[in-house]
Amino acid sequence: MPGATRDFENRIEAFLQELLDGYTPLKIRGDKIIRDAILGHNVFYPHEINLIDSPLMQRLRRVHQTALAYLTYPAATHTRFEHSLGVVIFAQKIIDALKSSSRGGLISDVKTAEIRLAALLHDCGHGLFSHASEIVYDEWDPTGEIRTLKRADPKLFGEAEGHEILSYYIVRSARFRELWEDIISKYNMAPAKQFRILTKVNLKRVANMIIGVKASSDYPLWLSKIINGPFDADKLDYMGRDGYFSGLVTPVDTDRLFVSLSIFDPRGDEPFICVDIGGATVLEQILFNKMLLFSSVYNHHKVRGSFRMIASLLQEIRSKQWTVSGTRLKFAVDFLRLDEYDLLNSKQVNRELRVKVRKLRERILVKRALVISPQALKEKDLVSQRKFFELEQQQSKKNAMELELAQKAGCDTVFVDFPPRPRVEKIGKQSMVRLSEDTAVPLSKLYPASGWIEGYSQYRRRSYVLVPSGYEDAVADLALKLFAERDIKLDKKLCLELAKRPRRLGS
């Protein structure tokens, strides 16, 4: 495994050498005010502006936060760039709240600088179309380098997502350290305190914060949880931002949350951030909003259709070794070499690729042949429920079914899509609520978050069979037969009604 890690690090170094070639940070004369559409005016410091202006961060302007969701929600054109700035803003609000709390933590200027850097850089490892590319090089590649790194160090990377691992290695790289040293050298004539803070920043601690582990042995874990935790700055920003730009109302009373924050220090155990009982309702708002975003935005059938189309296309580009703007998608870091403009806006040489890109660019999306709700699986039919769950969990079986359906229907694409469930268990189990000076309990003890997941799975969750326009009827017939052959009995009428295509089917 050490050899695999070293090869991965070398590829990161090569990418950064190429990306940062020719970039020279300039001395910024003072703090800058950046106005955010949601969060208003906020201060960023000179060394942060140098990073923001660097190609590493500017690349994120060309990576949409919610992939191709803007094909369904026209205003959802926000990017990873403004989200990254928003996470810095929320991280500072959490820091300020904890400092002002009567039970607040001691957060030094150096720690504050490191937390803000982790917030700014936490998504620098996101590839084109965000999670749509991540699923290709991580989830769909069980023997690939990201999975190898996770198996080699499960304690460090066990819960980390692919883009977080890339961000971690970028910040720890020699080339990024060179950039950082070049930046802080510009301020050696600045006020002594400011320069001293910058020279004490430890990039290894910043990288650890990004993946939510202890920054170092002498740093409490709760510092990292400001960036990657159950109710972190990342969630506070993306929930409001994704909701706002998709037109969804997702209010979180952050002012109430911040005045409720404090540090709980149990005897003989790791201190943690907690919320006073009066602020627990805000955690419930976070839970509700995450469920709402999944059911209304992330798992909307058109959003899932465009997501599956672009992820499938990236997988095909990778497997067939097609070249896009001179780049082949062989390794995870290659997904950082391209941005969405490279793929969608250029005239691709490969005709097959050009046709598929045109469909995305002109919003020629797949349509619903079947929609499968939990009610379509009869409540007492345990065999069908078990087989359906097994199909959902096994990528190879889904791939085989998609291929068989496409071949029998005579179309080029069929997706048997199981949208992910919202992961709110972490919020419920790890969000701590203070009941008294010496008692704190998980939110799940006060509020049954697991019941929300169960309710979502039973009533709101939908799975789809998605096909090119004109193939809906043929694939619906075939899919129902293939499900039956796999001992999955479905309510035909309900599946078709949910797809808004009611008709009688043959047996």
Image (cartoon, grey):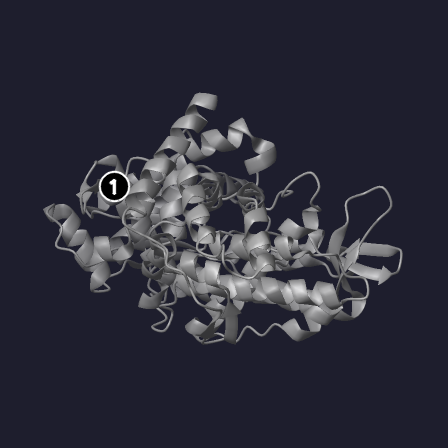
Q: Residue furthest front?
A: 189
Give x and y (percent) for residue 500: 36, 67
Front-lying residue, 108 or 393: 108
Residue 36 showing in the rendered view: yes
Front-lying residue, 277 or 33: 33
Q: Which element is circle 1 on?
A: helix
Give x and y (percent) for residue 463: 44, 54
Which picture quadrant has residue 445?
bottom right
Residue 64 versus residue 348 in the image, above or below: below
> Measuring 55% from the left and 45% from the top, which residue is drawn there?
211
Front-lying residue, 144 or 341: 341
Left or right for 251, reference 411: right
Which picture quadrant has residue 259?
bottom right
Report crowding for label 1: few under 14, some 14 to 19, many 20 or more residues within 10 A (C-alpha): some
Give x and y (percent) for residue 105: 75, 57
Give x and y (percent) for residue 458: 58, 57
Left or right for 292, reference 226: left
Left or right for 227, reference 481: right
Front-lying residue, 359 or 435: 435
> Measuring 31% from the left and 52% from the top, which residue is drawn there?
23
> Measuring 33% from the left and 72% from the top, which residue is drawn there?
74
Identify the residue under disc 1: 316
Residue 294 versus residue 36 in the image, above or below: above
Left or right for 205, reference 309: right
Q: Amino acid at mark 1?
A: Glu
Which picture quadrant has residue 50?
bottom left
Q: How many marks?
A: 1
Residue 1 showing in the rendered view: no
